Every structure is written in C-alpha cells, then in structure tokens.
Image: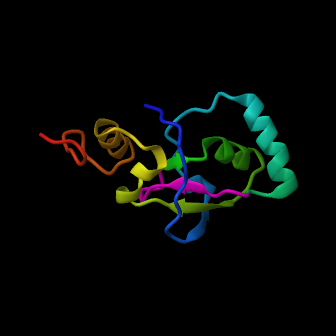
Amino acid sequence: MYLKPKKIIFDSLIKKIKIKDIKPNQENNNQELIDQLEIDIKLNGLLCPLAINTNNILLDGHHRLTVARLLRLDKIDVCVVPKDKIKYLYDPTPEQYDELLRNNGYLKSDEKYATED
C-alpha cells in the first residue's frame, strides 16, 4: 500500500542516524526525481529530514534516501514518528491506518488499532 504523505508533523527532535540503519519499505522508480534531488542535495544539502518510525522503517523520504546512498553519505537527519502520530502523515481511513501500522512494525498481523471489531 502506498499513500502519499499530506504533511509532515515534527513533534520530536531531529537527529542524525547512520544511513545503513534505515529500512526502506518501498522501491523507487522515478529516476528523473532522483536525478533532480541529487543535484539539489549536492548544491543545498538535505533540507527536509527523513521520517522514520521507532523501528527505523522509512515512512517518508525514499527518494532522498536513495540520493544519500548515491552520494555515499554516512549519516542523515531523521525525525522519529511515534505510532500515535503516523496517521497525521497520510490522513488514512481507519483500515488504512491499521495497515500502515502493520506495515511499519507497530501491529501484528491480527491486531487492530483504529478499526472496531
């Protein structure tokens, strides 16, 4: 499932972590965007931190992470988004929210958080 983030809400500190510790959860296939980001990050640096969950699974910034790896950066700025804030990234339905939580390691396959039984 892919939902485009509607906005990023940072209510925690931004910190640096090693790129090798970040676990992407989707493939990047927009080479034009990657090429544009590479030029921009070379010129301006990374202006927007990646968003990860508490298990280091990438929530937002897959193309930026790809570019950081291409540029052989060691560490990158991230914001850790806790489980109760992940829904503010995407504005999902309750079912989509439960699936987001499952996909990002917050819920087991049979658990529910946002939907009723």
User: For residue 56: magenta?
Assistant: yes
- In which quarter of the view is residue 66 placed? top right
Q: Position of residue 53 (x, y in %)?
A: 45, 55
Q: Is residue 33 above or below residue 56?
A: above
Position of residue 44 in the picture relative to residue 97 (left or right) = right
Q: Nearer the viewer, residue 49 or 19?
A: 49
Q: Nearer the viewer, residue 79 or 115?
A: 115
Q: Quadrant of the N terminus?
A: top left
Residue lying farthest to the right in this orientation:
43
Q: Magenta residues?
A: 47-57
Q: Position of residue 3 (x, y in %)?
A: 48, 36
Q: Quadrant of the C terminus?
A: top left
Q: Position of residue 107 (x, y in %)?
A: 27, 48
Tell me which residue sits at (50%, 69%) in the image.
12
Q: Is residue 35 above or below residue 85?
A: above
| Majority secondary structure of magenta residues | loop
Tell me which residue sits at (20%, 44%) in the image.
111
Residue lying farthest to the left in this orientation:
117
Total marks in image? 0
User: For residue 64: magenta?
Assistant: no
Position of residue 103 in the picture relative to residue 26 (left or right) = left
Q: Nearer the viewer, residue 100 or 116?
A: 116
Position of residue 42 in the picture relative to residue 64 (left or right) = right
- In which quarter of the view is residue 75 placed? bottom right
Tell me which residue sits at (66%, 41%) in the image.
63
Q: How is the image coloured?
A: rainbow
Tell me which residue sits at (50%, 47%) in the image.
59
